[in-house]
Amino acid sequence: MRSIWKGALTFGLVNVPVKVYAATEDHDVSLHQVHAADGGRIRYQRRCEVCGEVVAYRDIDRAYDDGDRTVVLTDDDLKSLPSERSREIEVVEFVPTDQVDPITFDRAYFLEPDSASPKSYALLRETLERSDRTAIVRFSLRQKTRLAALRVRKGVLMLQTLLWADEVRAADFPSLEDPVKISDKELELSASLVESYSSDFDPDAFVDEYQQELRTLIQAKLEKGDAVDTEATFGADEEKGGEVIDLMEALRASVERSRAARGGKKSDAGDAGDEAEAAAEEKETKPKKRAKKAS
């Protein structure tokens, strides 16, 4: 795995240097769009609505629109924010684990000790396990202030970023306000049904049936010769290196831009942050999937 961020966990006078790794990955088959008539690749261009020109990724800034005015924010503007320069994961408080509502859980990250001696890491890990508490922490990642739960999973400290309170919608359903009478017999039958389905949860027992079927379908088409040469799907502009913006070009431009700003030096946080931002903007639609328990 490649670390995406380096910093230090801090609480009181304790400082725990760590590396941060994404704890999950997407296994979906990557699909792109083509013209149904000839299989040609469909590309998306970033075209300026004022001058009509196609704009290179390196020439794009961000902006905020309040409805009447637009404020342009350059990379330098965003880098000047003090929170983005911080390399600390600050422990705000330790709370009972059952007080953290799972609905607020967002992305998961593993933490690896980043020092010659992992003693402070092990100390924090053991403290959390014995106290049955979760640390609420605050840190900055990819130009955003994050709130997260710090907990232990299989001997490894991990961060679970949390949604802010105002990001969780209130479930206001008038239909649930009317009283409903449920008989003891109905409860008994319902409990019996639950018992008949009771089991210990094993994540490995479930497979993504849709992705399996999709891979089988693709392989069958390849074996039948129902495919075209990839080079034939690219147009003349692509071959000539024209200004056609797609995901890979955006990622490459983002990485080069980041490295140039640092004088050619590599940075886990910089590269991963820029790549993630570009990928989020350019990601093409993937088919919906369903889960199936393995037999």
Image: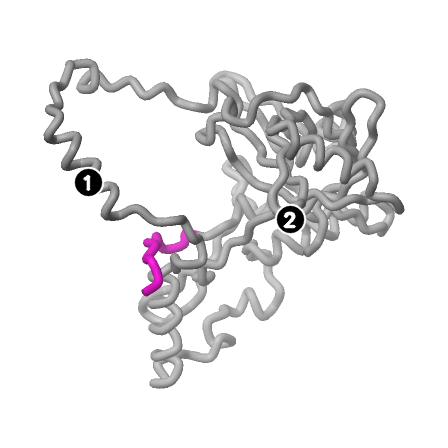
What's the residue at 81%, 38% (across, down)? 17
Q: Badge 1: few (under 14), some or many (20 or more) residues near its Cα, within 10 Å?
A: few
| Circle 1 or circle 2, nearest the eye | 1
- Badge 2 marks a residue whose secondary structure is helix
Q: Is the magenta stretch mostly helix, strand or loop?
A: loop
Circle 1/circle 2 CB separation < 8 Å: no
Asked whether residue 42 is in view, the answer is: no
Count of number-bearing discs: 2
Q: What color scheme is it? A: one colour
Q: Mark 2 points at which residue?
A: 275
Rendered view: 221 above or below 188: below
- Queried whether the magenta region covers residue 186, the answer comes back as no
Rendered view: 191 above or below 21: above
Q: Residue 89 carries which label?
A: none
Q: Name the residue under label 1.
A: 192
**Nearest the eye: 30 or 210:** 210
Q: Which residues fall within the magenta stretch?
A: 285-295
Q: Badge 2: few (under 14), some or many (20 or more) residues near its Cα, within 10 Å?
A: many
